[in-house]
Image (cartoon, rainbow, N blue to C red):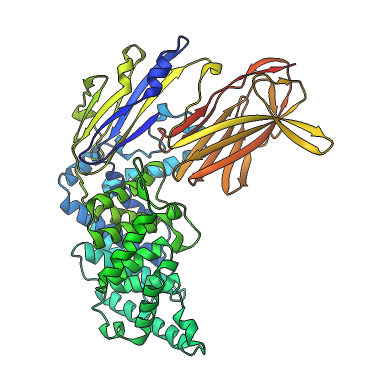
Amino acid sequence: SLPFYVRGKQNKNVEFKRLKETLESKTISAHSLTLEYTANPIWYAIMAIPYLKEFPYECNEQLFNRYYAGMLSRYIVSSVQNFKQVFDNWLKDTINKSLLSPLAKNEDLKNNTLVETPWIQESLNEQEQRMNIAKYFIEKNIQKELNKAAEKLLKNQYPNGAWGWFPGMPGNRYITQYIIASNGRLEKAYNIDTRLTQAMDKAIQYIDKEVEKDYRRMGSHPKKDELEKYVPSPLYIQYLYARSFYLNKNKQFIQSEAFRFYYNQAVKTWIDQNEYLQGMIALVVFRNNDKVLAQEIIRSLNERCVINEEQGMYWKSISRRGVYWNEASIEAHSLLINAFYEITNNIETVNELKLWLLLQKQTQKWGTTVATADAIYALLFNGKTDLTTTFDANIIWGEKPLNVSKENIEQATGYVKTKLIPKDIKPSHSDIQIQNKGESISWGAIHWQYFENLDKISSYSSNYMSIKREYYLEKLTSSGKILEPINQNSLLKTGDIVVVKLIFECDRNIEFVHIKDMRPSSFEPIQVLSGYHYRDGLGFYSEVKDASYNIFIDRMNRGKYVIEYPLRISQKGKFSTGIATIQCMYAPEFNAHEKGMIITVK
């Protein structure tokens, strides 16, 4: 498979060399060639909104995100043309493919049927969530959920203005500041109702008092020079960020000694913070009219980013999620989109940043309610976002315009899929020309399925994903065990122990990864029990089948990994090793395979 991306207003030529190369084989038997294209993938962000409502736990952070989801939904329903018509149609069609989980889509393009994986229940749960999307966007339902979430939030706020994590737990400054900042973003994006206005007033007074207390305790420190070197912790940076939305509230405290101390120390030491907190500081100083420093921080961030044709613009240091809130990759990237847009208003850069964020939804879920809320806001309210419900693209495939009828186009997302049978497949189908007339990115993939002798299948990898397999003969020497590489000329004998080493990598964070390593019929597994393992930062479930070793990985961060397992040779003769494959079940176009070879056993 070959995935491709087309930016807004871009013409792109895609060449699938693999098709031309394999068609030249005399032993090949074609099965199918499939082209799929999604004109409006921004709709996958819209379809994630109900997840904010359905999360089962009622912590205050989650309650606010339900309120947040209601406000976003009300805005979308009222502002997007044809929105109501699209969802009315979805309600009439209970088997609409738009509502299928990405795990359940494209079963014919996956190396392994979903029912054979550990993720069948996850697919059903996600599909059930999506089946409720259309009902969720009915206006009276939105208002009902909005009122319910707001009432619970107000009820859970303590008299001093704080919110705890859960009702009854002590007031929590992180949770309170998160709610203040998130509400501030909503108010900044568009006019909202004022039911939480008084609650925000009380919450701001609470966090101001806590900062004042901390400063008084710190001010009694005997070494003044240490105070000048003080680097504010993430909690204080978050405080300044939350406060930057409400500089007109409790104004006298903005001029206080306590506030100025934390503000000035954040200004002095911004370079010592990570990119997420630097983005917060940039917005804080910009809103406090220190536009020169804000631009300086943005320039610094710009110099450290990675710009990639296929992935857009991102930072390597935040592409992996850490264990603390200030090390969250999706949340960090979303905030940096806000910072670049508000401070520079550079639409081109913002769109490149949004590309990376949207691509994370292609190969995985955004993961948490906080990440989902932040990502949706960043995609919808920064730069130019085209929430069209039409298919706005021209595609030339096999030297002919792609025949796309309204009946074949998935509503809203603009997803289309065309499949060719063997007799219609020609070398010219390796060339695709796409004209994206819309403002937002679109993406697609071409999938080539064929039958070939195992020993004649060549390796396939892409810029996105690769897998390599190595065999080693285990030998006992006077100095201990050694591993000797095996190739087609190696002579093996029954009873030998062979160690298989699978080396695989991916250029982005990815979820629901399946690795299938075929096994020569003369090799028998030594470890026969299936189970969960954790090695070198990677958790996976392994399963031994009659002819293969299967690995299922819930989540794999970008990088390179190695998994080893032993086999014992049981029969003499010549055998094909078969191939090793890796594929993302969420997006089957992300795949690779390693070629096989013939081995001889004496």
Answer with left or right where residue 422 lies relative to residue 406. right
Q: Is residue 515 left or right of residue 519?
A: left
Identify the residue at horizontal 80%, vertical 38% (top origin).
480
Which residue is depicted at the point 27% across and 69% down? 292
* The quadrant where residue 258 appears: bottom left
On the image, the x and y values in percent for residue 519 come to: 62, 25
Question: Is residue 446 something one can see in this rendering?
Answer: yes
Along the line of sight, the residue nearer the viewer: 595 or 402: 595
Residue at the far top: name it.
26
- Residue sitting nearer the eye, 582 or 307: 307
- Residues 508 and 157: in front is 508
Residue in view at x 64 percent, y 19 percent: 488
- Work out which residue is located at the far right of the displayed protein and give it: 478
In the image, is 113 to the left or to the right of 600? left
194 up-or-down from 223: above or below? above
- Residue at (28% x, 59% y) in the render: 340
Residue closer to the observer: 72 or 444: 444
The tally of labels here is 0
Image: 314 above or below 288: above
Q: Is residue 420 above or below residue 188?
A: above
User: Where does the image place residue 104, in percent across and percent down from the top left?
Assistant: 40, 35
Q: Quadrant of the C terminus?
A: top right
Inspect this view and state whether residue 160 appears.
no
* Image-quadrant location for residue 30: top left
Check the image and report above or below for 505 versus 156.
above
Whole-percent x and y of residue 406? Answer: 19, 30
Where does residue 79 sit, x and y in percent of width and height? 16, 52
Assign the N terminus to one quadrant of the image: top left
